Amino acid sequence: MPVVRDLRVLLRFADFRRLLAVRLLSQCADGVYQVALATYVVFSPEKQTSPAAIASAMAVLLLPYSLVGPFAGVLLDRWRRRQVLLYGNLLRALLAGGTAFLVLASVPDWLFYASALSVTAVNRFVLAGLSASLPRVVDAERLVVANSLSPTAGTLAATAGGGLAFAVRLLIADSDAAVVVLGALLYLSAALASLRMGRGLLGPDPDVVQPRLGAALASTVRGLASGLRHLAERRDAARALAAMTVMRFCYGALTVMVLMLCRYAWAATEKEGLTLLGLAIGISGAGFFAAAVCTPWAVGRLGQYGWMAVCAGSAAVLEPALALPFTLAPMLIAAFVLGLTTQGTKIATDTVVQKAVDDTYRGRVFSLYDVLFNVAFVGAAGMAALMLPPDGRSAALVIMVAALYAGLAVLLLRWKASGPRASASVTP
């Protein structure tokens, strides 16, 4: 099986193994923590959840990182990335423990959101640092394969963490606080795993490291401007980020719809709805794994833009066909398809950005990438809040998303024809 062979080759790189271990533990903790937040906000029996409430929660938790993200990138290009992974995960472990206490204390929602905000704020640094570090632990020849397997393995770890959280919540302890504590322990494990790598291994190079925090913050605006100029000069990277933003928007809108369907249309109780949501997340995770298997082969034959166009076009056709009945079985198939197409596009985007962007600017660009993810997801949630009825069934939303997928597919084919560098065949 090619993916097994590729993974075996990558695992021969000791530093790749160590970075992958940090990613798996960190993103598994993310999955646990995110499910704890979702169950507390959406599935608590005392809460009457609406699309607007979900959108508001996403805005509170994600929109502030439109400001934090660029600062994270500038600092990542000055701080030792290994240290970011170490101290970032230690801080998240401490803050997640605080969130568990707040859940037990039944504090007002704004205080709970403030605590959750602090945990996910640190996440901006850790995820951008993981992506920016990958070219430092594998050679250029295997970068596309590493981008296929490493981030996808992290996504699968997050999905597994979500499944573990569901299992703890449904089978062991009917308490969101217990799930949050589990996430804190996993964050601590990720911090300890990062100690297996040398301080300078992940870069940036010593001649561009600016260790003084005051000097780094003073140059943040200049650094962000230079990062944007650098991205503007890298047409392939800018186009790939734009495409991924649209895919993320579509995925976010459908995520809110599935949340509402699980909460009200398909389940008679909160526990049954939580079980169905866990099943949908697991099946979408299987789509992520399928993307890791097929993306290196597809990119090698179709090019980056060609494969992204196939992903968007497939979603445009299959999403309305499967989603419009608003029944459980077809929607679960749609979850697999959208997991595959969204993750396939992300793998291709990661590779384009990492190859097109200089290492000195990589942290800034990946932080901007992260900001686009957040804004797209929150914007999608806001749109869904306007369009979704209380039970989650909206044909207009499904058709709008299909039209976005179709338009993106056409645009990607045009970019493929006009941008041979991004469309060139890449053989893993």
Image (cartoon, rainbow, N blue to C red):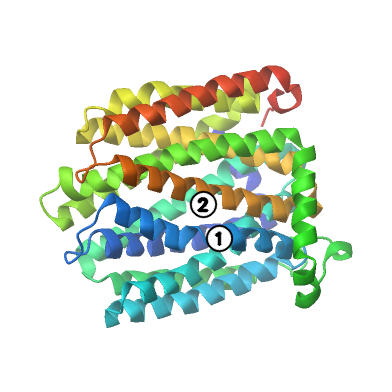
Callout 2 crowding tier (Cα within 10 Å): few <14, some 14–19, many ≥20: many
* Among the 4 quarters of the image, the one containing residue 31: bottom left
Instruction: Give the residue pinned by disc 2.
Output: 374
| 10 Å crowding of disc 1: few (<14), some (14-19), many (20+) | many
Give coordinates of residue 243: x percent, y percent. Answer: 58, 34
Of the numbered discs in the image, which one, if any, rests on residue 98?
Answer: none
Residue pictured at 51% horizontal, 73% vertical: 92
Secondary element under disc 1, as helix, strand or loop, is helix
Q: Is residue 181 above or below residue 396?
A: below
Quarter of image, res 112? bottom left
| Residue type highlighted by circle 1 | Tyr
Q: Residue furthest left?
A: 268
Give coordinates of residue 271: x percent, y percent.
17, 57
Residue toward you, 151 or 245: 245
Residue most extreme to the front = 386
Residue that label 1 marks: 65
Give the structural element (helix, strand or loop) at label 2.
helix
Q: Amino acid at mark 2?
A: Asn
Q: Can see residue 23?
A: yes
Q: Is residue 219 above or below residue 317?
A: below
- How far apart marks 2 and 1 lie (CA) works out to 7 Å
Circle count: 2
Above or below residue 258? Residue 404 is above
Query: Left or right: 255 with respect to 150?
Result: left
Q: Picture coordinates of residue 4 (x, y %)? A: 54, 38
Nearest the viewer among 278 and 24 is: 278
Mark 2 vs 1, N-terminal side = 1
Q: Is the C-beta separation of discs 2 and 1 under 8 Å?
A: yes
Q: Position of residue 335 (x, y in %)?
A: 34, 37
**Up-down: is 402 above or below 49?**
above
Residue under the point 23% across and 57% down: 49
| Residue found at x 21% / y 27% | 325
